[in-house]
Image (cartoon, rainbow, N blue to C red):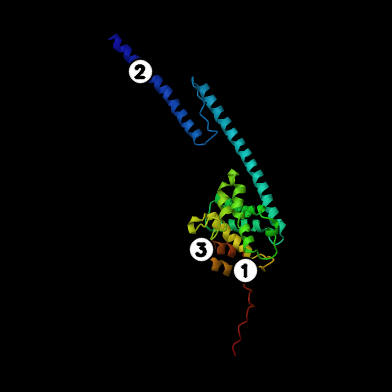
Amino acid sequence: MACTIGVASGLALAWGLATKVARPLESFNDFALQIARGKFGAQLDDRSDELQELVKTLNYMSASIEAYDAETQRLTDSVEAGYLDTIVALANSIDSKDAYTRGHSQRVAELSVEIGKELGLSPEELKECRYGGILHDIGKIGIVESILLKQTRLTDDEMVVMRTHAALGDEIIRPVRFLSKIRSAVRNHHEWWNGTGYPDKLKGDAIPLIARIVACADTWDACTSTRPYQVALPHAEALKVLERLEGQHLDPTVVAACRRALEKRRPRVSRPELPAVAPEKSA
């Protein structure tokens, strides 16, 4: 009998201890899951039992990880900004070499973002459109100036050289990891919807969307800018060019989005109010 009572007492004590330990362990488990999911800075409630020191240690660890993560992100952002500033400066140097193309990359970037908004892209995707537009011609750094700045139309041989700028630009930004998502804008913005573009002969939806967007913005800016061998087209004429290229060189959906974006740019013309006419007196 005494043995039975002793066993029962032992089991009750064990159950009590297990319950006392299990409850905080559940909290620790939830806490660990929050940290694993990236919720750095999560804190446990202070306890007055023997687990209090462990709680304090875990809370200190969580706060330290949060501070480290914030500092790491700050440094990463700083490095990325430095890379981007350098590459943008290089892109601007290309534009500035030729008075006819000055500001081209920035205009392409702005219109690319506007097209992206019309297509319902996310903020992150719009940022990629902006970077892709700015850097789409970065490969022209490697094109000899006798071809790059030629004031007349290029010969067939010169055009072959000029077309290498797309793949060359891809090679320039390839080592920059945070620009990986815009590589297709740089490499493939001269791909045509019908598959006859360059450098990869991609066709239709196989062309990444960002490249299709930049291609349309690039085409628009080329049409509406004065070059040594062409005069800038008026808005209506440039729209007709987009219509002709739609479904052949350019994605029809992107062209439609471009038209909507351009329409929003145009100032609304209000109708002049007509002077009020006094009613005729009856005879």
Q: Residue at x 64, y 47 (%)?
A: 84
Q: Check disc 3: other Cα within 10 Å, few if <14, some if 14-19, many if 20+.
A: some
Does residue 127 sit above or below 78 in this rendering?
below
Q: Which one is closest to the eye, mark 3 or mark 1? A: 3
Q: Nearer the viewer, residue 107 or 118?
A: 107
The reply to whether callout 1 and callout 2 are in contact (CB within 8 Å) is no
The residue furthest front is: 157
Helix, strand or loop under label 1: helix
Q: Check disc 2: other Cα within 10 Å, few if <14, some if 14-19, many if 20+.
A: few
Q: Nearer the viewer, residue 190 or 263?
A: 190
Q: Residue at x 52, y 65 (%)?
A: 248
The reply to whether callout 2 and callout 3 are in contact (CB within 8 Å) is no
Look at label 1 and name its amino acid: His
How far is the residue under mark 2 from the one under mark 3? Answer: 76 Å
How far is the residue under mark 3 from the one under mark 1? Answer: 19 Å
Does residue 131 sit above or below 29 in this rendering?
below
Q: Which mark is residue 252?
A: 3
Look at label 2 and name its amino acid: Ala
Q: Check disc 1: other Cα within 10 Å, few if <14, some if 14-19, many if 20+.
A: few
Q: Which residue is mark 1?
A: 235
Q: Which residue is mark 2?
A: 12
Q: Nearer the viewer, residue 14 or 221?
A: 221
Q: Quadrant of residue 113?
A: bottom right
Helix, strand or loop under label 3: helix
